[in-house]
Image: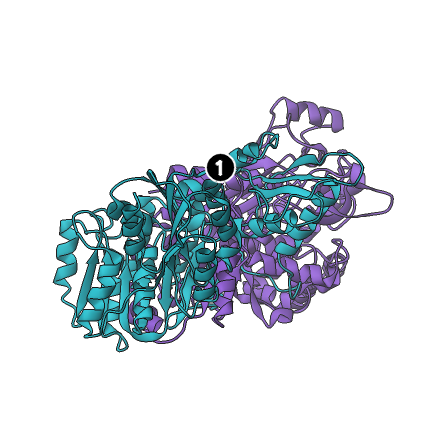
Amino acid sequence: MTHAQHPAQELGLTHEGRGGHEGFGGREEARAAGALLSAPPRVITVGAGLLDEALRAQAVPTTPVAWRPPLPGTAADLARVLADPRRQQANELAVRRLTSARPYLVGVRRASELLDEDTFLHAGPPITWERASGPMRGALIGAMLLEGRAADEREAADRLAAGAVALRPCHEHSAVGPMAGVVCPSMWLFEVRDDEHGGTAYCSLNEGLGKVLRYGAYGPEVLDRLRWMDRVLGPALAATLERTGPIDLRALIAQALQMGDELHNRNRAATSLLLRELAPAVVEAAPGTAAEVLRFVNGNDHFFLNIGMAAAKAGTDAARDVPGSSLVVAMARNGTDFGVQVSGLGGQWFTGPAGVPDGLYLGSYGPEDANPDIGDSTITETSGLGGFAMAAAPAIVRFVGGEVGDAVRATRSMYEITLAEHPVYQIPGLGFRGTPVGIDVTLVARTGLLPVVNTGIAGRVAGTGQVGAGLVEPPAGAFTSALHALAAVSK
Amino acid sequence: MTGPANGPMSGPANGPAIGPEQAVLVRRGAYHDSVALMRVSRALSELPGVTAAMVAMATDLNVSILREMGFAVPEADPGDLLIAVRAHDTDAAVEEAERQLTAARGADSDPEEQPPLTTRSATARGAGDLVLVSTPGEYAFFEALDAIEAGLPVMIFSDGVGLAQERRLKELAETKGVLVMGPDCGTAAIGGAGLGFANVLAPGPVGVVAASGTGAQQVTCLLDRAGVGVSHVLGVGGRDLSAEVGGLSTLRALGMLDDDPATELIVLISKPPAPEVARAVLKRRPRTPVVPALLGQAAGTDLTRAAEDVLRALGRPVPEWPSWPARPGPRPAPKRLKGLYSGGTLSAEAALLAGQGDFVDFGDDAFTRGRAHPMIDPTLRVEALDRAEETDVVLMDVVLGHGADPDPAASLAPAVARTPTTVVIALIGTEGDPQDLRRQATAFHEAGAAVFTSNAQAARHARSLL
């Protein structure tokens, strides 16, 4: 690889305004024009297999493209969007901003600093109480109880149905939340700052596995744990991070990938690395509670997930709002709809029905217990981690129902729909190739390949919690409707 | 295939008195390229017990052909695959079709290796110096754009690419300094590699810039016959010299050949260009001599004369162009001329020189949606020949070379033999072509046709018969 795939780096573009194509320079032109006639060509063939065979019959080396027509009904939109003269440079700029983000964990903050007291955040595109699924409703009920705004489940549900609090997507408040992703004002949030572009992103603290709020559980043990996090964990982390100073998440994630995490369904290495960074400072900053804090973090392999999500969000937000860019900057689910946002289309959501994940189930749970796909954790895939980095995490391929070969194939296939390879996030098993990063809606439509998403599976009934984990297929319609909207604003 | 088979139709002469049954299946959204489908159709038709078979995308043209063949075709979109068979055991035939279609997909040599799904992906792998696009026309723009954005020259074999898209591609190519050949560029030869429909040509001093694929094939085949080889053949597409496109590819191709040390003389094959484009071309003033071969009514030249002009410019003798006159037969006096062509420029040239008759270019967009080009798939021309009448003269081209039908005489010569029509064939090819020019000429001649290697001579001959 790959200066052809990374023209942004080669071009060395430094700001949005630089137009024209002069960046390709004389070298490229000389190769194209002069050398074409100076030697027998190597030919990339796309289309009729016969013309590829005719070249091979002449001993001309060829690389055939395994071409298929685009997704039905997308040809006219593709023609418009691809013809937009801004697209190539816009995408180079957007994906370079995504991959050059340098996220640092800088602290924890109360959500009330960001939210007014009558607003709860949730995962995915906008949703109303009426359309919310079981686990989303369960988490919102839990948040009402946690905030002391209802005495019991029934009152919480009634008040939510009556619109007592505004429900807004995390994504609209520089935040992300796993599964239901519910954030209420009293919760602590990780704060991640992108040193390269100056953005800030937030994510809640991870509660652990099993019966937890984010999977829609709101029983006494769930609320007790949240209150402990509120009282003990949050303040301890705040004091700890003041001592450690900013923690370089880009370096930590790169390390974790090389230690077998894909940063969505496996965060064991990243959590361990984080614990190494934090432990001495926790002991110093919170001597009275250090043991319980460290035991809690150590007992939850997914403690890092939320931090990684905020890091991913910092990068994708840096890639937003580049006019003409077809780069996906968010994929998120609310348990009812799967939504995507695109750099060149501002804050608009494009949605399709959330699918039911295919995977392995805990205990006696089965597919009939599963809720449709839910959570903002697809921000990992949006930034080249999670399902896109499956080849880095052979240890969990069985957990999501496959073999090692499937993981390698999944990652390899994602290079077909992405704009770049990550310069720092690498996969040792693929010769340290960078992870596929930067989903392009035009490439999704052209190839018919949908993003590979790893996910946990929430129980369908409010209050159940996690029932399994697996893979889920996003709805193609979310991508094709985004493409249609891009076509409408194409130049 | 779809016409009467070469041998006797197999029927249940001695078996139980059950007639053949028919089945038409629709596979929604199952895409295969038209050449692969033609091969499956052909293999299926040759199975014992199968009287008719066609596996094709459900384009309007293909659906109407199936209806003419007597099949009841269910509702289907052009993106759907149709499997139609008439056979004694339709289940077995359909099963065989499915097996062949799976085989046509090609084996994945390394299941872990991801093949490139777009030209963008292939260029990112550094897989080539040149991209050859032959997808259906409505998608060719996407792949060609990938090539140009990656800084690679591209040949667009596909037709049906819109004028605005052609302009966009060529303007972008200007900024990247790469050549766009096409759209609808049927042939090219670069560094000895023949692309698209390509005759086997000896290396030599003549570089060709051609707005017409079959025009370039005719000229280079005649030059080859006269012992003159070519350096490169660069196609530019039939609209390049129009005012809308402004000759962008022609100018670039001329410049490239002018800079090429192997090229001593350039032939520019085109319809007369738009005047402002002609001025731009003239302003170029290449150091290498240019022989223009401008075709059409106003130009008053033909492809054969253009080849002869090149020979004279090189100081080479002009040979007799080989031909095989028809053996005299008891045919009634012809009254009407029918041109059944696969090459657009050859068809136009013949129509002009004959000055009368009905000419059909089966290579036109209208006949190639969801169907292989007539240089590959003889079906439509075989049918047309079978419909010709005793008092017709049929004039047709047969184009040889890489990419074309590996043995056109196998399907067309029997049709020539069984038609009561007088047939004149322009056989465009070289001694080096894989189909064996002489064997093809002999087969058509023995089937009763007059065979010419010059299309112009064939057309004049056909006219003389009327």
Tell me which colouring the rendered structure shows: by chain
Dot 1: within a 10 Å radius of its alpha carbon, few (fewer than 14), some, or many (20 or more) residues? some
B228 relative to A384 in the view: left or right: left
Which tint is chain A? purple
Q: Position of residue B166 (x, y in %)?
A: 32, 49
Residue drawn at point x = 44 percent, y = 66 percent: B438
Seen in the picture, residue B287 relative to B96 is either above or below; the reply is: below
Q: Residue at x 54, y 60 (%)?
A: B116
Q: Position of residue A24 (x, y in %)?
A: 32, 66
Furthest toward the front, the residue is: B330
Q: Secondary structure at mark 1?
A: helix
B78 relative to B461 in the view: left or right: right
Q: Position of residue A103 (x, y in %)?
A: 52, 59
Front-most of residues B215 and A56 = B215
Colour cyan belongs to chain: B
**Eyeballing the image, is A366 above or below A12?**
above
- The correct choice, above or below, for B407 with respect to A431 in the image is above
Residue underneath mark 1? B61
- In the image shown, does B445 or B437 lie closer to the viewer? B445
Protein chain holding label 1: B
Which image quarter: residue A477?
top right
Q: Nearer the viewer, residue A406 or A468?
A: A406
